Amino acid sequence: MRWLLFRPIVVLFIIPILTNNTNLIFTNADKGNITMALDKDMYKRKIKEMLDDNDTYIKINKDSTRKLTKLKKILMWWKQADYISEVAYRNMNCSDGVLLRAYGSLKIHKPTCPFRIIILSIDSPLHAFVQHFYIR
């Protein structure tokens, strides 16, 4: 019932402030079922600091798309040799995938390490290939 009393205030004052502020990111915390508003510049700076840690992450300075060409040849050979079906070939043969993406999941219970890096591989060129063999 209280929500109904305060709803006009939220609609009139808070929502326009939040929608006009383009320097905010809204994200869910990993514990506590809480939605947080973060400063976009601070978020980018913290994630960059974590990714620049050479003890944890290695920057690869080569183009891996040539490996995908080899993968397509292997898939074609497997299809011709009847190792995989036509449907499996079409599912695994990615022609327009996106690069892997990384984002930071907010950890509100750890003040010294505020984010956990998550690598999102869905829709990447190798996602369907790995998924096919994971299910089997």
Image (cartoon, grey):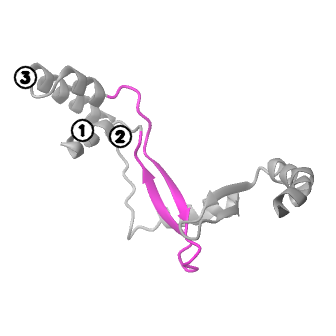
Q: Please name the amino acid that badge 3 sits on.
A: Ala
Q: Is residue 13 above or below residue 121?
A: below
Q: Position of residue 27 (x, y in %)?
A: 63, 58
Q: Residue at x 33, y 40 (%)?
A: 127
Mark 2 to mark 1: distance in Å?
A: 24 Å
Q: Is residue 46 above or below residue 70?
A: below
Q: Please name the amino acid that badge 1 sits on.
A: His
Residue annotated with mark 2: 63
Question: Which type of secondary structure does the marked residue at label 2 adopt?
Answer: loop
Q: Is 84 positioned to the left or the right of 63 in the image?
A: left
Q: Nearer the viewer, mark 1 or mark 3?
A: 1
Residue 68: image quadrant is: top left
Mark 1 to mark 3: distance in Å?
A: 18 Å
Magenta-colored span: 94-122
Residue 83: image quadrant is: top left
Q: Please name the amino acid that badge 2 sits on.
A: Asp
Q: Position of residue 19 (x, y in %)?
A: 81, 48
The residue positioned farthest toward the front in the image shown: 1
Q: Position of residue 85 (x, y in %)?
A: 17, 24
Q: Nearer the viewer, residue 86 or 22?
A: 86
Residue annotated with mark 1: 132
Image quarter (top left, top right, bottom left or bottom right) of the C terminus: top left
